[in-house]
């Protein structure tokens, strides 16, 4: 892991992060990578929202075999590969639907199974 950039703070800008929270981004004197750091900052969650997101993901993380085994009989799954290489998945069972998209076939399938099961509780 790299160390945080060092330098004199020359300004602070309020930036909206991925989670929607606004936080200050420090502009440093002589920082060649300011644009990249700002882009990464915008694409990340604030610490509070990151903790909430991690907790939500932990609840969804059933083991793969258990997730598939707990789906009801008659479950209909549709997986479509888009032109950009992403997979779009749709699972319908017991009158409820879960949809997601992902990079891989298996990960997309597992994600929609876990989403559907998490919504059942």
Image (cartoon, grey):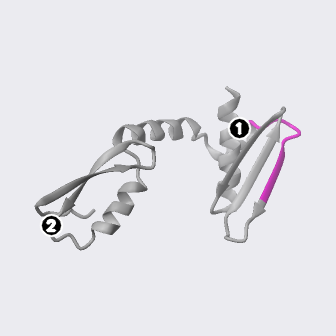
Q: Give 92 or 58, whichever is nearer the viewer.
A: 92
Expressed as whole percent of the image width and height from the top left, the position of residue 53 reads 47, 40
- Up-down: is 21 above or below 34? above
Q: Secondary structure at mark 1?
A: helix
Q: CA distance from mark 1 to mark 2?
A: 49 Å
The answer to whether mark 1 and mark 2 are in CB contact below 8 A is no
Q: Is residue 66 visible?
A: no
Q: Earlier in the sequence, mark 1 or mark 2?
A: 2
Using residue 110 as the reference point, say whether residue 3 is left or right of it.
Answer: left
- Up-down: is 65 above or below 95? below
Most frequent secondary structure within the magenta stretch? loop
Using residue 84 as the reference point, say whether residue 96 is left or right of it.
Answer: right
Q: Give 116 or 22, whichever is nearer the viewer.
A: 22
Residue stretch in magenta: 70-79
Mark 2, residues whose alpha carbon is within 10 Å: few (<14), some, or many (≥20)? few
Q: Which mark is residue 66?
A: none
According to the image, label 2 marks what residue?
29
- Up-down: is 81 above or below 20? below
**Quarter of the rendering containing residue 28:** bottom left
Expressed as whole percent of the image width and height from the top left, the position of residue 49 reads 41, 39
**Quarter of the rendering containing residue 30:** bottom left
Q: Which mark is residue 116?
A: 1
Question: Residue at left 25%, top 64%?
Answer: 2
Specify the farthest residue to the right.
74
Using residue 31 as the reference point, say whether residue 96 is left or right of it.
Answer: right
Q: Is residue 15 magenta?
A: no
């Amino acid at each position: 892991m790299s160390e945080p950039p060092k330098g004199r703070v020359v300004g602070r800008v309020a930036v909206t992060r991925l989670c929607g929270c606004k936080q200050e981004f420090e502009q440093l004197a002589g920082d060649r990578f300011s644009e990249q750091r700002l882009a990464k900052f915008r694409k990340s969650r604030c610490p509070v929202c990151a903790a909430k997101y991690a907790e939500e993901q932990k609840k969804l993380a059933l083991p793969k075999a258990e997730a598939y085994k707990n789906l009801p009989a008659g479950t209909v799954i549709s997986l479509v590969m888009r032109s950009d290489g992403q997979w779009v998945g749709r699972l319908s069972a017991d009158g409820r639907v879960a949809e997601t998209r992902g990079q891989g076939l298996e990960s997309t399938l597992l994600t929609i199974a876990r989403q559907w099961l998490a919504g059942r509780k």
